[in-house]
Amino acid sequence: MDKVPMTAGAYEAIMAEIKTMKSVERPRIVKAIAEAREHGDLSENAEYHAAKEQQGLNEARIAEFEDSMSRAEVIDVSKLSGDTIKFGATVKLVDEDTDDETTYQIVGEFEADVKQGKISITSPIARALISKTIGDSVEVNTPGGGKSYEVLDVSFI
């Protein structure tokens, strides 16, 4: 089984989400199914089928999260240091073609959000950055074509 790296904050957020799905969503969906059953013929009951679909999606998501949590490797980013890029690093880059500066933090898949500057450890740019240091040049194959970045700074916040 592969370990799933994540920050402590992501671990806590996902555990809270699981608790909500089990204690709030599951009972709400069961109630909706019961109410839909009371309307009669289930073969033509759109409310019943919609509630059953919601139930399936909720249960699948719970199972997916619980599987990931059982394989979680929680990494406390505040205890990391150094000049080498690794999981949890906040990296400042400059695009060598446009001189645009960008800052990313390398995080787990569940907490990745490019709009917040958090990229997944499995993304092409993160994979290219791992083990690099300040001043290194990085070539990244993206869906939009090849990009070239220079590493300006590495920190662990």
Image (cartoon, rainbow, N blue to C red):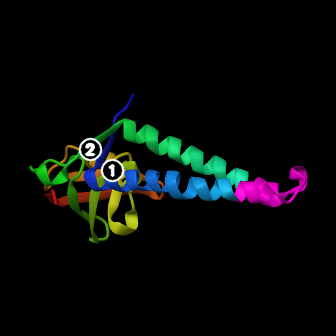
Quadrant showing the N terminus: top left
Q: Pointer 1 and pointer 2: residues touching (CB < 8 Å)?
A: yes
Q: Is residue 50 visible?
A: no
Marks 1 and 2, how far apart in space? 7 Å
Q: Is residue 65 visible?
A: yes
Seen from the viewer's position, the closer of residues 106 and 92 is 106
Q: Is residue 9 above or below residue 130?
A: below
What residue is shown at x 85% (from left), y 60% (from top)? 39
Residue 151, labelled with which disc? none
* Magenta segment boundaries in residue numbering: 32-49
User: For the residue labelled by badge 2, is the local secondary structure a helix, a strand or a loop?
Assistant: strand
Expressed as whole percent of the image width and height from the top left, the position of residue 48 reads 78, 55
What residue is shown at x 85% (from left), y 57% (from top)? 45
Expressed as whole percent of the image width and height from the top left, the position of residue 27 reads 59, 55
Residue 74, labelled with which disc? 2
Q: Tell me the kind of residue under disc 1.
A: Tyr
Mark 2 Cα within 10 Å, few/some/many (few <14, many 20+)?
Answer: some
Residue 43 lies in the magenta-colored region: yes
Q: Residue furthest top?
A: 1
Q: Is residue 41 left or right of residue 78?
A: right
Q: Which residue is mark 1?
A: 11
Mark 1 Cα within 10 Å, few/some/many (few <14, many 20+)?
Answer: many
Q: Tell me the kind of residue under disc 2.
A: Val
Expressed as whole percent of the image width and height from the top left, the position of residue 139 reads 31, 51
Seen from the viewer's position, the closer of residues 53 and 86 is 53
What residue is shown at x 16% (from left), y 60% (from top)? 157
Q: Is residue 133 left or right of residue 109?
A: left
User: For the residue labelled by badge 1, is the local secondary structure a helix, a strand or a loop?
Assistant: helix
Q: Is residue 39 left or right of residue 124?
A: right
